[in-house]
Image (cartoon, rainbow, N blue to C red):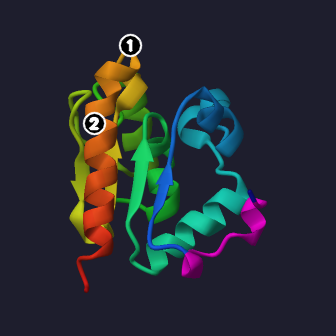
Amino acid sequence: MKDIREASADDFDALVVPGGFGAAKNLSTFAAEGAACRVNPHVLELAEAFAEARKPVGLICITPALAAKIYGPGVTCTIGNDADTAAALDKMGATHEACAVDGIVEDAARKLVSTPAYMLGKNISEVASGINKLVDRVLELTHEND
C-alpha cells in the first residue's frame, strides 16, 4: 500500500473508488457540506489525472457525489434515487440519473461508470450485482482502444 500522493494515473488502467460514509467524510467534505463540498486535494488530483487521460473511472455508493468536482458540469452519474442527494449532485452541476441497486449508469463520453450500492441496498447480496456490473464495465472500457 502506498500513499495516494505517490499514485499516478500513468501506472494504472482504471480507477475504482469505493463508497461508504468514510468516502463522504474523508475523501471529501460532502457529508458535512453537501453541494458546497471540497474533495481531498490528493484524491482530486489523482481522479482528474484519470479523467484527463480518458481512462475509465468507477464511482460506487456515495462517491458519485465527487463526479462534478472531477469532471465538471454536465457529467452524468447516479447515487440511486435519494432525492436530497440527487438534488445536491444537480446543484454541483452533475446530471443525476436514477438507478436501481443492481444497475449502473455510464457517462460514455467521460468513461465514467457509477452504481448506487449501499445508497439503496441493505446488504452485500443486494449491492453485489451493481458493483460487479460496474467493475465489469470499467474493465471493458480499459480495452476499448485496443
* Pointer 1 residue: 122
Q: Nearer the viewer, residue 31 or 53?
A: 53
* Residue in the foreground of this view, choosing between 126 and 59: 126
Foreground of the two, 77 or 7:
7
- Identified at 45% across, 53% down, the residue is 67
Give the residues in magenta. 2-11
Magenta residue check for 114: no
Q: Which mark is residue 44?
A: none
**Residue 103 spot, x, y in % from top left:** 21, 37
Residue 82, visible in the rendered structure: no
Decide whether residue 9 is among the magenta residues: yes
Residue type highlighted by circle 2: Gly
Dot 1 lies on which element? loop
Label 2 SS = helix
Marker disc for residue 130: 2
**Sequence order check: which comes first, mark 1 or mark 2?**
1
Q: The disc labelled 1 sits on which kind of residue?
A: Lys
Residue 80 position within the rendered picture, expressed as x and y whole percent measured from the top left? 30, 30
Mark 2, other Cα within 10 Å: few <14 / some 14–19 / many ≥20: many
Q: Main secondary structure of the magenta part?
A: helix
- Quarter of the figure with residue 37: top right
The answer to the question of whether label 1 and label 2 lie on touching residues, with beta carbons closer than 8 A, is no
